Amino acid sequence: MKFRRHARRTPSRTMLRLRMEAALVATLLLGVPSLGGHHGLAAFDTKHTVRMQGTVTKFEWINPHAYIYADLTDENGKVANWKLEMGSLGMLTRFGGWSPNTVKPGDKVTVQGFRAKDGSPYMSLGKIELPNGQTLLGAP
């Protein structure tokens, strides 16, 4: 019985090209959802800071950002329920002094931040003054 040595086949250029194209497509498909996911402050007017007072109606301690909802009175005396976007939970807890119990519905607060460019009651929270006098950053 004779054993033949089989020469190890090297992939052809066509096969290598197909593998490279498949890897590129996979990378693009997996990477695209993350491209639009983090918008930073693009939706907010960062040239003008607003300061308002009001009452917390809801506190969402969720990823990727925490949110406070509050009935705030604007400079014209109009009251609206505002959505206040904050930083990530990790940054808020590690560097900002926040916890899931920092604010609760009914708390009287003063907030400062950047209002949405589209004029909606939506703000990037810069800082908040709590009922106990403590001031915390919204995005440490």
Image: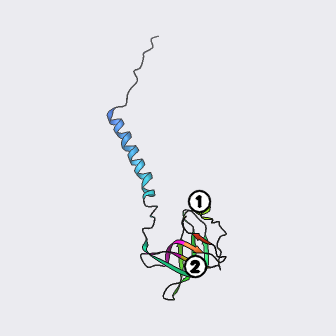
Image quadrant where residue 5 sits: top left
Q: Is residue 2 left or right of residue 54?
A: left
| Residue sitting at x 61%, y 67% | 61
Q: Amino acid at mark 2?
A: Thr
Instruction: Please tell me whether mark 1 or mark 2 is closer to you in this view.
Output: 2
Q: How is the image coloured?
A: rainbow
Q: Which residue is mark 1?
A: 90
Label 2: element kind:
strand
Comparing 29 with 86, the one in front is: 86
How many marks can you see?
Answer: 2
Percent of width and height locating residue 68: 58, 73
Give the main secondary structure of the magenta stretch.
Answer: strand
Taking the view exactly as shown, the residue that stands out farthest to the left is 13
Position above or below: 133 against 89: below
Query: Could you tell me residue 21's position as x and y percent?
Result: 36, 43
Element assignment for label 1: helix
Q: Quadrant of the C terminus?
A: bottom right
**Residue under circle 2?**
110
- Residue interval drawn in magenta: 112-126
| Residue positioned 42% across, 77% down in the render | 118
Label 1, label 2: how far apart the Cα atoms are: 23 Å
Q: Quadrant of residue 109?
A: bottom right
Q: If you read the primary sequence from the N terminus, does the residue marked by circle 1 or circle 2 appear first? A: 1
